[in-house]
Amino acid sequence: MRRRRTGWRSCFWATAETSPAGKAARKRYKGEGIVNGSPQKVWECLKPDPNGLRVKWDNNVKKFELLEQVSSDVTVCRTVTPSAAMGIISPRDFVDVILVKQYEDGTVTSNATHVNHPSCPPQPGYVRGFNHPCGCFCVPVPGEANKTKLISFFQTDLGGLLPRSVVDSFFPSSMTEFYSNLTKVVKSLK
């Protein structure tokens, strides 16, 4: 397994790992940093909710659609992304089963993976992407009521016929922008 640091911004960092030899060549990305705000505030900005804040600040999320409420903490959602990298990457859509868990210590996690859903076949105008197991953890910082350690990880197959170099250059900068924009929106909440 090969690791490399892919970006720095503020107190956030991201790493990329390639799969071990003999397995599909996909990268896993992990971001980690401290956000000034309680886990509840940070989660309010991150949660996969069709009427939530994320579609307003995350440049990589154009729309969330709730396809099915399986239980109180499990949903099936469609996420739509805009085109990216100056139009080189066409709009994508992703259909995922999402598990949200809240723990006694204040930690909130969101975990997702691709699923086929009968009410959402591939849509014209979008390339169907696939999220392998991914998620984020909003963890309280001990002794700091207004700070959250955010750990995010993803391994996404964007689908389509994109050159590996385009994908490799897109994810690190996108992740850095994600943390930067999240920090701004959490700060703006009262």
Image (cartoon, rainbow, N blue to C red):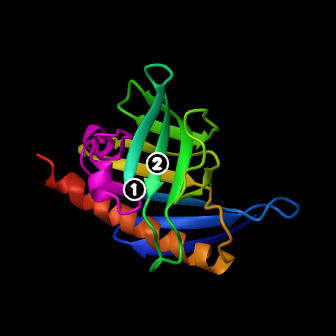
Q: In screen coordinates, is 35 left or right of 25?
A: left
Residue at 65 percent of width and 48 percent of height: 132
Q: Amino acid at mark 1?
A: Val
Residue 160 is situated, as x and y percent measured from the top left of the image, at 66, 66
Q: In screen coordinates, is 2 left or right of 61?
A: right
Determine which residue is flagged by label 1.
61
In this rendered view, identify the residue nearer to me: 156 or 78: 78
Q: Which residues are magenta?
A: 34-61
Q: In screen coordinates, is 167 left or right of 80?
A: right
Vertical placement of 134 versus 181: above or below? Answer: above
* Label of residue 72 in the image: none
In this rendered view, identify the residue nearer to me: 143 or 89: 89
Q: Amino acid at mark 2?
A: Thr
Q: Quadrant of residue 50?
A: top left
**Label 2: how many Cα within 10 Å (few below 14, some 14–19, many 20+):** many
Residue at 40 percent of width and 45 percent of height: 64
* Labelled pair 2, 1 in contact (Cβ < 8 Å): yes
